[in-house]
Image (cartoon, rainbow, N blue to C red):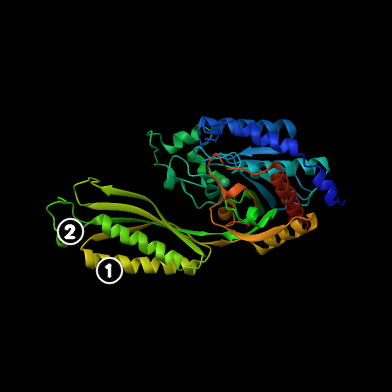
Amino acid sequence: MTISETDLKNCFDHERMAALIESFGKIGRTNAGGVSRLAFSDEDRKAREKFLHILETEFNLAVRIDPLGNIFARREGRYPDLPVIMTGSHLDSVRNGGKFDGPAGVFSSLEAFRTLDLLDIETQHPFELCMLSSEEPNTFGISTFGSRGMVGTLKKKDVETLCDDNGQRLPDALKNIGGDLDRMAEAVRSSGEIKYFLELHIEQMPCLEEDGKDIGIVDGVTGIYREAVTVAGEASHCGTTPMTERKDALCAASEIILALEEAARQEEGQAVATVGHMTVFPNSINITPGQVTLDLEIRSFYQERISRIREKVAGVIEGLVEQRGVRIERKITYDNPPIRFSPVVVNAIAEATEVLGFSSRNEVSMAGHDAAHVNGICKAGMIFIPCRKGLSHCPEEFTTTENIVKGAQCLLKTLLLLDQG
Ligand SMILES: [Zn+2]
């Protein structure tokens, strides 16, 4: 049976989409009008229960929850032995974040599944709707927990000893949403099980809005490199220590920060670099800084640009040791290379936007996403929708229901093209 694009579009109900976003936005709503639904919290658990209730009462899907709290709902296809086509996003949020980052993707996928039912479509492949666990940085400093656990790159030993600021252990926090870290290995999906993975997300950049485009076709996700740097100088009385005798750790750290900024600026808009966290010891008004720790981060879609910035900063650091007499220790804390999504998925999204009559542009995600990790075991892709002024992770985060529905229509059309391809 062939269905027309008009039939497909007509099945998506704007009011229902708006109601879903609104009702979940109430779970963890803050006084500032944002949402705090941190992973493994009571709010996270309530959102999961509500989501499961919808799946169980409004759909006929085989629902499964893995030991990490990832939720999968399977819709059988004509050939049950074929690998699955998976789609979804996350329902957790950052502290005082917005109500669209994550839910826009989950509910686009949900409404796509509803449309399949309404039009009585039998797909070739089994389809799986997923809600991935703890995508945002949780209180244990771990992000994309569910997806990295699912592809097997995050191991029990990486997380089992982690404690949050309240002294709670991660394995105990995970129990709050029904998870079990001891059974983490059971969450791993093999590369043959999933054929495609598609995630819709708000853009978190202002490009679509500024360009007046409906859909962002995501070519890939930025590489992210992080390094912890410790600069050890000498703390001494700031009045009695002459300028020529100082080993000021903060002055040395400042040179590193400015060198990083300059190196990133020289990459013609194709890289960004930041020092967003720093501690100064003893941090006192009349003592020269004896020690500084800082975390530097570099992002680019081009590995060679990340490498070039690293080399320039390394050169500056070497010089500082000599010129300022400080000691500098460096430790790589995160090094995720850029990833390119499968051309099969990228082309399917482009074709979907064309047949649906939507405008689009190709772009790169400068934020990390579950899809980037799931890409390790299948062909993944992402659809971006515009969000106001590119704002996210704040109460001002906003996109229109029309944007989400267009994105959901594009998502379903893409899934169907992949299913037939
Ligand atoms: Zn997100």
Residue lying furthest right? 1
Position above or below: 252 against 146? below
Position above or below: 306 against 103? below
Position above or below: 72 against 413? above
- Asked if residue 245 shows in the view, the reply is yes
Label 1 Cα neighbours within 10 Å, binned few <14 / some 14-19 / many ≥20: few
Q: Secondary structure at mark 2?
A: loop
Q: Nearer the viewer, residue 78 or 347?
A: 347
Nearer-N-terminus badge (1/2): 2
Q: Spatial distance from mark 1 to mark 2, Cα to Cα?
A: 16 Å
Q: Residue 213, position in %: x, y? A: 69, 55
For residue 270, side relative to residue 74 (left or right)? left
> What amino acid is found at the position of numbered circle 1 in the picture?
Gly
The residue tagged 1 is 319
Q: Quadrant of the C terminus?
A: bottom right
The image quarter containing residue 43 is top right
Q: Residue 254, position in %: x, y? A: 31, 58
For residue 44, side relative to residue 351 (left or right)? left
Q: Nearer the viewer, residue 185 or 295?
A: 295
Q: Secondary structure at mark 1?
A: helix
> What amino acid is found at the position of numbered circle 2 in the picture?
Arg
Q: Residue 58, position in %: x, y? A: 74, 33
- Asked if residue 194 shows in the view, the reply is no
Residue lying furthest left? 240
Q: Nearer the viewer, residue 318 or 56?
A: 318
For residue 94, side relative to residue 120 (left or right)? left
Q: Nearer the viewer, mark 1 or mark 2?
A: 2
Label 2 Cα neighbours within 10 Å, binned few <14 / some 14-19 / many ≥20: many
Q: Residue 183, position in %: x, y? A: 51, 40
The dot on residue 246 is 2
